[in-house]
Image (spheres, coloured by chain):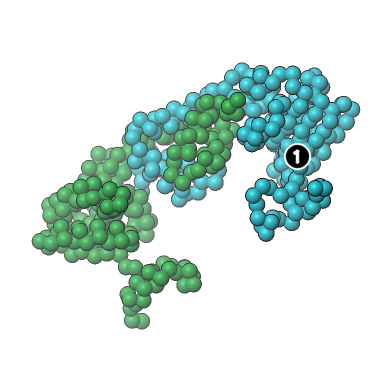
Chain colours: A green, B cyan
Amino acid sequence: MSVEPESLEALIAEFAGLPGIGQKTARRLAYHVLTRPKSDVERFAGNLTNAIEKVHPCPQCHAFTDQDICPTCTERAGAKALCVVEKSSDIIPFERSGIFKGLYFVLGGVLSPLDGIGPEHLHLPQLAARVKDEGIEELVLALGSSPEADSTALMIDRMLAGVNVKRTRLARGIPMGSDLEFIDEVTMLRAFEGRVSL
Amino acid sequence: MSVEPESLEALIAEFAGLPGIGQKTARRLAYHVLTRPKSDVERFAGNLTNAIEKVHPCPQCHAFTDQDICPTCTERAGAKALCVVEKSSDIIPFERSGIFKGLYFVLGGVLSPLDGIGPEHLHLPQLAARVKDEGIEELVLALGSSPEADSTALMIDRMLAGVNVKRTRLARGIPMGSDLEFIDEVTMLRAFEGRVSL
């Protein structure tokens, strides 16, 4: 005898398909949903459908947007600094800090031969075109600190060899508020190498 | 400037409303959803709506079902053993082990004065009626091992004072495969008290 109704099993499977959600958590979430008022669950379903229908990558920068062109590309058109990130959600910490007032460009990934991600999977031609066409003066490569991110940054650097644009990357070092005891060796190495005078 | 489109924010809020899902995980899940094919997301939304529309508590035992009467109540009608659990999902480990072939009854909670859950919030009159009307011979109280569960079991025991039904509870002790080193004191106390001859 199957313990659970089919429609409940189907809902568990949906939650289990989400990243980082195992079978047990998926079951807990599905049972929770069934204890909610019907209107709440219908709103959830509606917000899922609504998001996938309305949100799409901005044709200029590939960040998720629900408009023809994303607000950043529209409102900051003409800015001369362009920050390259791996994925759309990487933009959030920049905007939250308010430190960067330029344009963004979502690359769509980093080179990862083991996962079969080569240059052809990234929005490289569009990045090159945007840098040239918009007269970008500084390109901030904010692709994370993995070896894959490093080699991707290097490739972009080479791709723009003949272009007069300053290339920078984010500083590497000790994050704020962290206990030195728990800092990994590579971060420590980078933080020490990059030490500055007081 | 808001970083995220409104419809994306709404989806993040839905995930963040689920138990055990924080703001960061909710954002990760919502961004993941947007990278899926539209048909997958629509199927997810459909399974949410479908589950909340079809699944409801069985009028006899309060377990979640998509039928008028749940399969267990139907197929095991006439069984003389009734297992009382706190919530619908507690039935799963019983059915998975296959050890119990009787009926179930979902109490809908355990007494918890601090959370404002009193006897009036539990399906107690229905439980009493079912025990009497169906001539139940053994009532297995499987309400967990918290003090709240214990006092709930005690109350049920008292409620059925004049009824000729055997009351049992699950054995308490060391779970299978666990390292004794990590067993808490109360479990150890119960396991030692309940030790059996070889």
Left or right side of B69 for B119? right
Instruction: Give the residue displayed 71% in from the left and 18% down from the top.
Output: B77
Residue B37 lies, with reference to residue A171, above or below; the image says above
Residue A38 picture location, percent across and down = 54, 28
Q: Nearer the viewer, residue B54 or B5?
A: B54
Instruction: Give the residue displayed 82% in from the left and 33% down from the top.
Output: B167
Instruction: Give the residue displayed 70% in from the left and 30% down from the top.
Output: B100
User: Which quadrant of the structure image shows residue B46?
Assistant: top left
Task: Give the quarter of the figure containing the C terminus of chain A.
Answer: bottom left
- Residue B148 seen in the current view: no
Left or right side of B187 for A178? left
Task: Give the quarter of the figure containing the N terminus of chain A.
Answer: top right
Residue B67 lies, with reference to residue B184, above or below; the image says above
- Residue A93 seen in the current view: yes
Q: Residue furthest bottom?
A: A198
Instruction: Give the residue displayed 73% in from the left and 37% down from the top.
Output: B142
Residue B177 lies, with reference to residue A9, above or below; the image says below
Residue A165 picture location, percent across and down = 15, 62
Return the residue at label 1: B170
Residue B38 picture location, percent across and down = 34, 33
